[in-house]
Image (cartoon, helix red, strand yellow):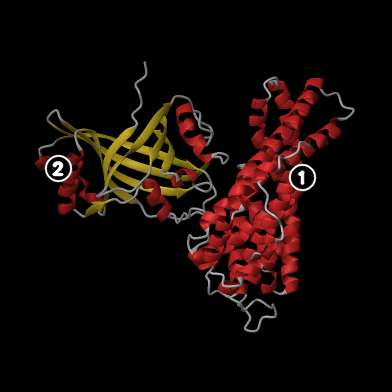
């Protein structure tokens, strides 16, 4: 019977300035009445894995694949602040008996069960390699205290999509409590730091590696220099928004080319949408011809991204679809998935060709030049010199009014085309709020969360429309071909299931909308924005459409 793997560790970590002090420290610890036995020199090779956006680390976890003396382990551990160099944390370490060809494909179920729910739908990639030469000792005091002591000399190497940087070695003392209490580690810490050139570590090896290798965690929030401020000129604000979204687009392109996971295409596509939306929302802040050119080019490159993304969404949702159709077989699943994968490959080739084209290179060069050009003293765009504080409230409230008007139309006439128009309006409102959110601190976030909730529901509804259209496309492609009738029957069941999902989403929308379309929400938005215009004029559009009880308008079947 295998021993149960440990799930907890308590250790002391001290940064050592002079590695030559190691022997003197060992001798000094003997004065604390420890019996000290030297152990072997161990060479650890730790490959840290995470998603591109470090989803595990953001959730307080680290995943590593370790090789040591011919043995292999996967380790999941919690990452958090250390106090005085002491770390008390969760750790799950599982040995792996067979050779691992691709460490990012984790074969250990106990590890996957911890990791997969956190990272889905993203996939693991290699992030950092940490190589450590470890000189080990065993400290004991009577029968009650046992401590594993090690002196580490560590090198770091950036892996995966991270830029390559050289990093200085890290020298550390690690003391892991095998038996005893935290006071034993604290005693060692006081003794060593008072007598030698070392200090409590504040970070794990992974966090130290990221700092020394200059690895930045990608974020959906702009850095300080690109965050929109209330007193920004509007043309400056637009440039900041475009610069950050183009940065987001650019950092996902390597993953798109390598086709590591579907989120690279998704996030790059979202960045193009946001850039187009910014150019539309603030169109009077930039020269008209410049804005039109960039909108057209972004629309062109967004099209092949959209084709790949639509198929990705279908593939991501297929397991849930199959689970709901109990009569379907593995063979049927494989036939359908094969068709989608083959057509996705063709769409991805089209996308790759667009990204490798002279047109795309010219677009990128022109956009970078535009973003790097100083602001004109006398801009021709009519709103260029207006501040964000002057313009943002009017833009956001106008989009909010359009959303309210269209949403009430959906409640009265819940047709798919009306839902689609609302989805577009809601996306513009959400983007407008997100673009200027840094100027208002965190105050806009609750309202943005409300828009996201509605947009997610509308997005799920739109997915059913796409899925039905895709099934019709597959049926047309298979017409006259020798296709197993059971597979055609499966397509019919999926088509019918989409109708059921659509009706459920329409009911869910009515409930969500009733919480959004309230006077209190509108008033709160105006207060946050500090809008001082005549309230009666602001609400004229809303009052022109009578509000109905969502429950009284049941969505029709279609």
Which label sits on residue 178? none
Residue 528 horizontal/vertical position (percent): 52, 64
- Left or right of 436: which side holds 324? right
> In the rendered image, which quarter is residue 333 located in?
top right
Residue 544 visible in the displayed image: yes
Outermost residue, top side: 1
Q: CA distance from mark 2 to mark 1?
A: 77 Å
Give the quarter of the figure containing the C terminus: top right
Is the residue 398 above or below the residue 24 in the image? below
- Which mark is drawn over residue 415? 1
Q: Residue at x 48, y 36 (%)?
A: 115
Say whether marks 2 and 1 touch (CB < 8 Å): no
Q: Residue furthest bottom?
A: 378
Q: Mark 2: which secondary structure?
A: helix
Residue ID for mark 2? 29
Give 489 or 544, whichever is nearer the viewer: 544
Q: Is residue 272 at all visible to an observer of this figure?
A: no
Looking at the rendered structure, the number of numbered marks drawn on it comes to: 2
Circle 2 residues within 10 Å: few <14, some 14–19, many ≥20 = some
Residue at x 62%, y 46% (from the top left corner)? 456
**Percent of width and height locating residue 376:** 63, 81
């Amino acid at each position: 019977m295998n021993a149960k793997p440990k799930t907890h560790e308590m250790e002391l970590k001290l940064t050592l300035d002079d590695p030559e002090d190691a022997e003197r420290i060992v001798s000094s610890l003997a004065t604390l009445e420890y019996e000290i036995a030297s152990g072997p020199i161990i060479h650890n090779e730790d490959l840290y894995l995470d998603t591109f956006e470090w989803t595990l680390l953001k959730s307080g976890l680290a995943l590593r694949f370790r090789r040591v003396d011919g043995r292999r382990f996967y380790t999941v551990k919690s990452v958090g602040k250390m106090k005085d160099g002491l770390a008390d944390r969760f750790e799950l370490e599982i040995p792996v008996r067979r050779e691992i060809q691709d460490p990012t494909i984790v074969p250990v179920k106990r590890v996957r069960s911890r990791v997969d729910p956190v990272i889905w739908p993203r996939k693991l990639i290699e992030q950092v390699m940490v190589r450590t030469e470890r000189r080990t000792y065993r400290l004991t005091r009577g029968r009650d205290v046992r401590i594993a002591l090690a002196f580490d000399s560590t090198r770091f190497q950036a892996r995966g999509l991270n830029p390559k940087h050289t990093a200085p070695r890290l020298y550390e003392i690690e003391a892991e409590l095998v038996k005893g209490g935290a006071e034993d580690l604290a005693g060692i810490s006081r003794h060593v730091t008072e007598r030698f050139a070392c200090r409590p570590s504040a970070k794990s090896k992974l966090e130290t590696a990221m700092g020394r290798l200059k690895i930045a965690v990608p974020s959906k929030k702009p850095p300080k220099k690109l965050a929109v401020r209330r007193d920004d000129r509007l043309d400056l604000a637009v440039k900041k928004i475009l610069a950050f979204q183009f940065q987001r687009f650019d950092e996902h392109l390597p993953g798109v080319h390598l086709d590591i996971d579907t989120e690279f295409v998704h996030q790059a596509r979202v960045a193009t949408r946001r850039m187009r939306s910014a150019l539309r929302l603030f169109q009077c802040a930039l020269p008209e011809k410049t804005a039109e050119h960039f909108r057209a080019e972004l629309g062109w490159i967004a099209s092949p991204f959209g084709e790949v993304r639509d198929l990705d969404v279908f593939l991501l949702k297929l397991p849930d679809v199959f689970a709901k159709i109990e009569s379907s077989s593995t063979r049927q699943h494989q036939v359908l998935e094969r068709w989608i994968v083959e057509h996705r490959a063709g769409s991805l080739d089209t996308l790759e060709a667009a990204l490798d084209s002279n047109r795309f290179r010219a677009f990128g060069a022109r956009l970078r030049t535009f973003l790097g050009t100083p602001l004109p003293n006398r801009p021709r765009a009519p709103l260029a010199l207006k501040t964000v504080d002057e313009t943002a409230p009017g833009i956001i409230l106008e989009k909010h009014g359009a959303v309210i008007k269209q949403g009430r139309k959906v409640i009265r006439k819940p047709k798919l085309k009306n839902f689609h128009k609302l989805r577009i309006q809601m996306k513009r409102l959400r983007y407008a709020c997100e673009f200027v959110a840094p100027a208002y601190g965190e105050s806009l976030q609750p309202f943005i969360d409300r828009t996201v909730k509605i947009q997610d529901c509308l997005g799920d509804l739109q997915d059913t429309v796409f899925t039905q259209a895709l099934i019709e496309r597959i049926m047309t492609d298979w017409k006259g071909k020798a296709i197993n009738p059971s597979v055609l029957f499966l397509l019919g069941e999926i088509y019918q299931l989409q109708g059921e999902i659509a009706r459920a989403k329409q009911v869910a929308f009515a409930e969500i909308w009733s919480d959004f379309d309230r006077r209190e929400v509108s008033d709160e938005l105006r207060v946050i924005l500090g809008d001082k215009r005549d309230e009666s004029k602001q609400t004229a559009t809303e009052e022109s459409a009578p509000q109905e009880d969502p429950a009284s308008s049941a969505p029709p079947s279609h």
